[in-house]
Structures are given as structure tokens and as C-alpha cells.
Amino acid sequence: MSPSVLICDDSNMARKQVLRSLPEQWKSSVQTATNGAEALTILRDNSIEVLFLDLTMPGIDGIGVLQGIQKLNLNCSVFVISADVQPEMQSKVKALGAKEFLRKPVKPDDLINHLQQHGLL
Amino acid sequence: MSEFHLTEDQQDCLQELINIAMGQASDQLARYLDTFVYLKVPNIESVDAKELMHTLSQQKNTMAVVSQGFFGYEGIRGEALLVYQEEDSGRIADLLGYEPDELSQDEQLIDISSILTTTFLNVFARQIDNQMSYNAPKLLPSAKDNLSEHLQQMPFSWDLALKVNINYQVTDYSFNCNMILLIPETAITNIKDVLDRILAEF
């Protein structure tokens, strides 16, 4: 069983880092977005089950995407992966419905652990 | 980034390393100021020595420059300049708050500059398998002649300046500052090699 996955980050390298960290069997069903607006379009038109989301992006940022998800009432597990490690930001994204906050650069073990904790693996 | 001659992948990789370093530097600044710092994607560009001298000498509104030397392994060394603009001086003063019995505004400016510079460079260095040590930060006198004199008196020859444009919004205030890293050619070559090594892992 592999869920439909979306990775949203403006950096190509960061997207690859997330992709590389995913369980092998998930890798075939991954879509990517390079900004918040693109992510929201994909989220609206597809049933995405797991979203890996960067925060600091030009245009609609990660916070905007989280607000969009709430507004659209989408049922999607969001893992924020960001360099903005301020405690206030971590609680803010959780208040907006994110399952977890992960620090960049993301470590494969860390990501897998969190997916297990949330019953996704 | 003409002098750097980075490929699109190298540029993306460098940008991401800088984003991560910037994120942690901002977290330290937020802790120091006991507030939340709103982060934007920092702009990076490279300028050659002549161009930088010209730009800095044209800037009439520079309020303050804090300069700090750094040293790592494998020829990585340089000088980090934090350049604050005149139009932001009031905001920075408000932000720092003036508490006569404690630190002067100059001392606080040196403090926040050093927090930004050392956190940024420590995190950057860790990602490229390096480690930095630092000289004491210095606040340069504001006259622009002093700045060009300072730049000419660097204890090493620097060939390129990597300019990271940082915009901080701190609750009601916002201020801009430029972090300019002056680095010699050996450091550039080293950084490029490391970027390639990181990219090869994907």
C-alpha cells in the first residue's frame, strides 16, 4: 500500500532529499510542487494523503498552504520540513494542523520514525 | 553569479545550504531579542572585488558595518561583513531598546551581528564538513573612507564576495541588512568541490 504523496519545496535539492528519505515502496506515487500555489492546485485536484511541506517559499508560503488545506477541508497528513526552526513557528504549524515539524536537512531515519509514529508505515 | 560560474544544480544546492544556515541564525536572533523573526528567502549573488568596492563606496547611507574574520580547514577563510542601512537605524535602535545601564547600542549591534555571523557560518560549515573559528567582531567607523581602507587591509587576498541579502521582519519592525562574505579563490574552489560532492549523492 503506497499513499499518494506530494513534496512541496522551492529547492530542487531539498525535494530530492525528501524523496530519497521515503520508503522504497512509496517512491512511485510521488508528485512535486515548487511553490505554495502549485501545491494547492495539486491538493485540490488530487486526493493527496501525505504532504511534505517547506515553509519559506516565494509567493504562497507553507503557512499559506496549511491555511488553504484547512479552508478546503482536505484530509491530508502534513509533515512540515523547514529551516525556520523557531519554537514559535513549530507550534504555529502544529496549530494549523501539521502532524510534525522536521528540521532541515531532513534525515531519512527521522522521517521514517515520524511516519511510523503516525501510523503511516 | 558570474565569478562563481555555478551550474543551476550547484546554485540550488548553495541556496539550500544558505537557507538552512539562515534559518538557524534567525532562530538565535529571535532568542536574543526574545521575539519572533519572520523569515524570507534570502537572495544570494556574487560580486568581484572591484565591483564591491565600487558599490560600497557609492552607498552613502550605510549606517554601520560590523566585520568579523573566520577560518576553517582546507583553505576556507574569509571576512564576514554585516552592512546596515541608514534608513533602518531608527528601527534597529527601537528593536534593540536603549537601556543605559546595560549595553550601548554599538555593543548590541556588535552582539547581534556576531550572533548572525557565527551561527550562519557554523551551520554552513557543518553542512560542508568544515568547522570555523573566528576573530573578534569589529564595528567599523561609519565614514565610507574607513570602509574601503578596511577592505584594502584584509590580511588575505579575497577574489570574490558572496552577498547574501537578508530581510528581517521582527514583529512591528523590519530591517534589512546585507551579509557580505569576502572569500579567497581557494575557498571558492573548495566550496564548489563540496557542492559537487553533495550533488553526487543524489
Image (cartoon, grey):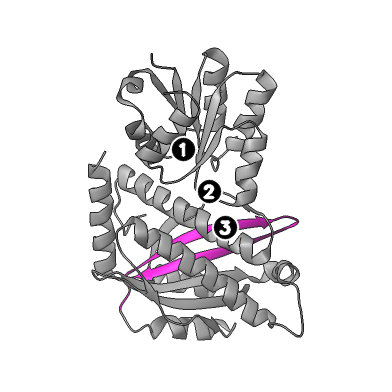
Mark 3 crowdedness (10 Å alpha carbons): few <14, some 14-19, many ≥20: many
Residue for point 55% across, 20% down: A43
Q: Amino acid at mark 3?
A: Asp
Can residue B172 be seen here? The reply is yes
Can residue A61 be seen here? The reply is no
Mark 2 crowdedness (10 Å alpha carbons): few <14, some 14-19, many ≥20: some
Residue B40 is situated, as x and y percent measured from the top left of the image, at 57, 49
Tell me the distance, in whole angstroms, between the alpha carbons under discs 3 and 1. Answer: 21 Å
Residue B30 is situated, as x and y percent measured from the top left of the image, at 63, 60
Label 3–label 1 contact, CB within 8 A: no
Give the residue pinned by disc 2.
B41
- Tell me the tag on residue A10: 1
SS for dot 2? loop
Residue B164 lies within the magenta run: yes
Residue for point 67% across, 24% down: A70
Residue A47 lies within the magenta run: no
Label 2–label 1 contact, CB within 8 A: yes
From the viewer's perspective, is residue A107 above or below residue B117? above
Give the residue pinned by disc 3.
B27
Q: Tell me the subunit letter for badge 2.
A: B
Q: Nearer the viewer, residue A81 or A13?
A: A81
Q: Which portion, as a residue range, is magenta?
A: B157-183
Tell me the distance, in whole angstroms, between the alpha carbons under discs 2 and 1. Answer: 10 Å
* In this rendering, position of residue A24 left or right of residue B55: left
Same subunit, labels 3 and 1: the answer reads: no
Q: Nearer the viewer, mark 3 or mark 1?
A: 3
Same subunit, labels 3 and 2: the answer reads: yes
Residue B95 is situated, as x and y percent measured from the top left of the image, at 72, 67
Q: Amino acid at mark 2?
A: Val
SS for dot 1? loop
Tell me the distance, in whole angstroms, between the alpha carbons under discs 3 and 2. Answer: 15 Å
SS for dot 3? helix
